[in-house]
Image: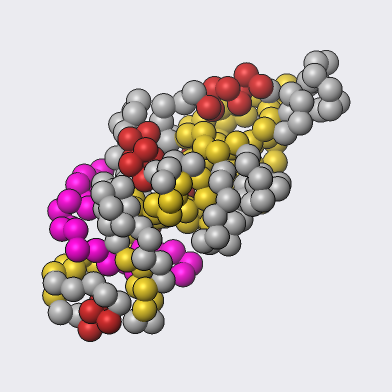
Amino acid sequence: MASAIRFQEVINNNGTALTGNTLRVTAISTDDFKWAYSGGGDNRYVEFYDAQIGADRVATITTGSYASLVNSTGTLTQVTSTVSGVGRQDAPVTGVSTATGVFIINLENIAVAYLTATGSSNVQYIVNGKMYEFAINRTPNQLQTSATLGNDVRFMSAPFALRFIGNNRVLNASATGSAGCIIGFKNLKSAGTIADDRRFIDAGVTGVVSEIYLDTPDNLVLASNTALSSIITSGF
C-alpha cells in the first residue's frame, strides 16, 4: 500500500550547518524508500531507489525533513539498532553491527520480524528484491502497534509464536511467546493449515500446524501452532 513521502534535499552540501545550500523538494513512493539515518553534525540522509536514474542513491536532507520522517504516523518508524548474533547484520548505518545507531525504516519492507531477546527483534528487510537482515530495539508487538497508527495501514499479521522450517530442521527456535513474530502481507506467497506433516514433526512442531510461505530471496517457510485465523487477522 504505497504512499508518497516528501523531504527537502540538500543539493550543494557544504558539510557545515547546511546553510547557504541549494534545497530541492523531492517526493518519492514509500515503495522506493530504503531507510534514513543521521550522520555527523546536522547531516541527515535518506537512501532510496531513484526511478529517474534507475539505481539506489543517497540524498542529504534537512534536519526538519528528517524530523518529519521520524514523526510520521504511517509506515515509517524510527528504531535503534542492537547487536545480535542472529542474521547477517546488514546494517543501515555504518558501524551499526558493532555499535548502536538510530535510523528510520519502512514497515512495508519488513518480510518477517521475530523476537530474539527481551525488547529486541531480528528483521528480514527487503527492498527492490534485495534482502537485508539486522536487529532492532523493538518487539514484534511494538512494530505491529506502530503499523496501525495514523492512516491505519494493515499489512502486518498479529504477533505469533513460530518456527523457521528449512531442510527438515529448525533454523531458529527463539521466536516464541505472544510477541514472537510478525510478517508483512506484501511478501506473503501462501498460507494454510496442515496436520501430521513429517517435516514439521521432525522440527519439533506437532498437531495442526499453520504453515506460511513467504516470497523472499530465501523462500522462507514458517510454521506455528497458532491458528491461522489468529495470525492473519486482517487484509486490504
Q: Quadrant of residue 164?
A: bottom left
* Residue 96 visible at all: yes
Q: Nearer the viewer, residue 198 or 154?
A: 198
Residue at x 25% of width, y 43% of height: 236
Residue at x 20% of width, y 80% of height: 197
Pick out the residue farthest to the top: 20
Q: Nearer the viewer, residue 199 or 73?
A: 199
Name the spot of residue 56 as percent of width and height, x first.
66, 49
Quadrant placement of the N terminus: top left
* Residue 36 visible at all: no
Judged left or right of residue 207, residue 222 is: right
Pick out the residue farthest to the front: 118
Q: Nearer the viewer, residue 149 or 28?
A: 149
User: Which residues make up the magenta segment?
Assistant: 212-236
Residue at x 27% of width, y 57% of height: 161
Judged left or right of residue 41, residue 80 is: left
Name the spot of residue 98 as percent of width and height, x first.
67, 51
Name the spot of residue 41 as percent of width and height, x first.
76, 26
The coloring applied to the image is secondary structure
Residue at x 37% of width, y 73% of height: 170
From the viewer's perspective, is residue 49 above or below residue 195? above
Q: Nearer the viewer, residue 178 or 20?
A: 178
Q: Is residue 118 magenta?
A: no
From the viewer's perspective, is residue 197 above or below residue 174? below
Name the spot of residue 233 as percent of width and height, x first.
19, 47
Judged left or right of residue 1, residue 69 is: right
Q: Quadrant of residue 211?
A: bottom left
Q: How many marks?
A: 0
